[in-house]
Image (cartoon, rainbow, N blue to C red):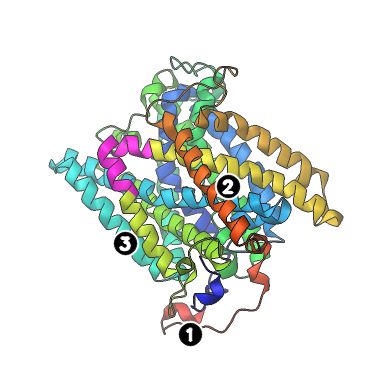
Amino acid sequence: MATADSTGGSGLARGAIGLREVLFQSVTSMAPAGAVALSIAVGAGYAGGALPLAVLLALVACLLVASSIGQLAKHLPSAGSIYTYPAEALHPTIGFLVGWGYALVEALLGPTTTVLVGYLVGSVMHDEFDWPFTTTWIVVMIVAAILIALLNYRGVRVSAQVGTVLGLFEILVFVVLAAWLVIKAGPGNTGAVFTLRFATVPGYHGFSGVAAASIYTVLAFIGFEASAPLAEEARNPRRTIPIAVVASCCVIGLFYVFTTYAGDVYFGPQRYATFGGLGGSGSPWITLARDVWGIGWVVAFFAILNSTFANGNAGTLATTRTWYAMSRIGLLPAALSRTHPRWNSPHIGVLVQLVLTLAIGLPIGIHFGPTAAFVFLATILSGVMIAVYMVFNLSCTMFYLRRQRSEFNWLLHLVIPILGIAAFIPAWLTALGIGSSALKFVTPLTYPSSKAGLVIGVWYLIGLAVLGYLSMRHPARLPEMRRVFADEPQPPRPPLPAGPDTDR
């Protein structure tokens, strides 16, 4: 490991993107259509017809942490925001462990999303044209991973603008489809799906089913914070980052509630537990689209596919910026802080992410099958990120008590963070499989998702070993996690090549 001063490169592209691109970085990181059609749908196998309640609870919990992130981003705009917040508010060692966990989460987004892209195309092509499923999903996954890497290699402006277009398309399609389903449901519309009345899945009856489903409804929200690592490339980051984080969480959260409600009441809450199986059609939502749109199901399919691809693109943006920030201060190998002399992208990190995507996604997908691989990886993502969100809430309180006492607000900086921590505890304990002997709402997940806690534990044991090495051999590096590089002067960078984007 080495500090960034020895790595070369011209740094990130300061001021390259505005509020629109930053906002859609968070939106596409949540993959609205893909989340509704895939991750949220998995939750139906646990919550049954009460799935909209699980989505609503996830929305409340995530809005609480979004408020905390927004309050922190006003004072700490940095590509290392994910670890800078707890490093400054709590302690650099906590910041390192948060960054270590987030590095795993974002690295796994690549294989998680590209496995899904391969699965979707493989399922539909097998059903419609009898293409070989396994060969198709593997080939498509590899192609998707390469395309995402090429977009990110080209730089933040191109990849963020692509994300904006893709995000608008998927949201429009699913809002129209959901409205169609609500109208078709007619007298089947009921507010009882927001209660425990239909939480009747065997083995997950009542709140235990909602808690288990919350793992996958929270998964749908993961990414609303992904605009924060773009702080050094955004214009006026102290304003744009808080707006993007809170607005994306609120708007897409309401989108999730509406679409999940629509699918529930149309399909029937009494039998909704069978809805979440990702069968041969690729997604139960493709089946719903066939029912009400006929051949128009193709539009829904492309929206889901587009959403999942955009999620992988946005995830790589956040991943490589977090690695860049940690490498810049000597916490990860120096090569990850190198930026392309022309595109100002952390190009080495992009290539590393491509390798990890294929090295993790292919063997796990082939061994368990793409659907089980997705659920397994998704449970790991949720387990880590829920803990990170709780640390963010605590960081908000401690930052304003210790660093900005004159601005301390009892509601924003104490009540909301405490409620945010409490709201995440049931889903977090269920994801890790902790407390099932003492807490009735903690019910073990099915295999291989039940092993997610073990994987997370091993990853953090490695992180503690790295932390010990840094503390003994390079103790000056950990305090560097508190630095806010957006406040420091940036050396001049070469002009971008002529084109329509350079006029902005």
- Which residue is label 2 attached to? 249
| Contact, mark 3 vs mark 2 (Cβ under 8 Å) | no
| Residue in the picture at 37% in, 64% down | 351
Q: In the rendered image, is residue 454 in sight?
A: yes
Q: Is residue 443 left or right of residue 397?
A: left
Tell me residue 383's x, y (percent): 52, 38
**What secondary structure is found at the residue carrying circle 2?**
helix
Q: Amino acid at mark 1?
A: Pro
Q: Amino acid at mark 2?
A: Cys
In the image, residue 110 lies in the stretch drawn in magenta:
no
Q: Amino acid at mark 3?
A: Leu
Of mark 3 and mark 1, the one earlier in the sequence is 3
Residue 152: assigned label: none
Tell me residue 129's x, y (percent): 14, 43
Viewer-side residue, 374 vs 286? 374
| Contact, mark 1 vs mark 2 (Cβ under 8 Å) | no
Question: Range of the magenta residues?
Answer: 360-375
C-alpha span from label 3 to label 1: 25 Å
**What secondary structure is found at the residue carrying circle 3?**
helix
Viewer-side residue, 498 vs 169? 498
Tell me the chief SS of the magenta region.
Answer: helix
- Which residue is label 1 attached to? 495
Of mark 1 and mark 2, the one earlier in the sequence is 2
- Which residue is label 3 attached to? 147
What is the crowding at mark 2: few (fewer than 14 residues within 10 Å), some, or many (at least 20)?
Answer: many
- Between tags 1 and 2, which lies in front? 1
- Between tags 3 and 2, which lies in front? 3
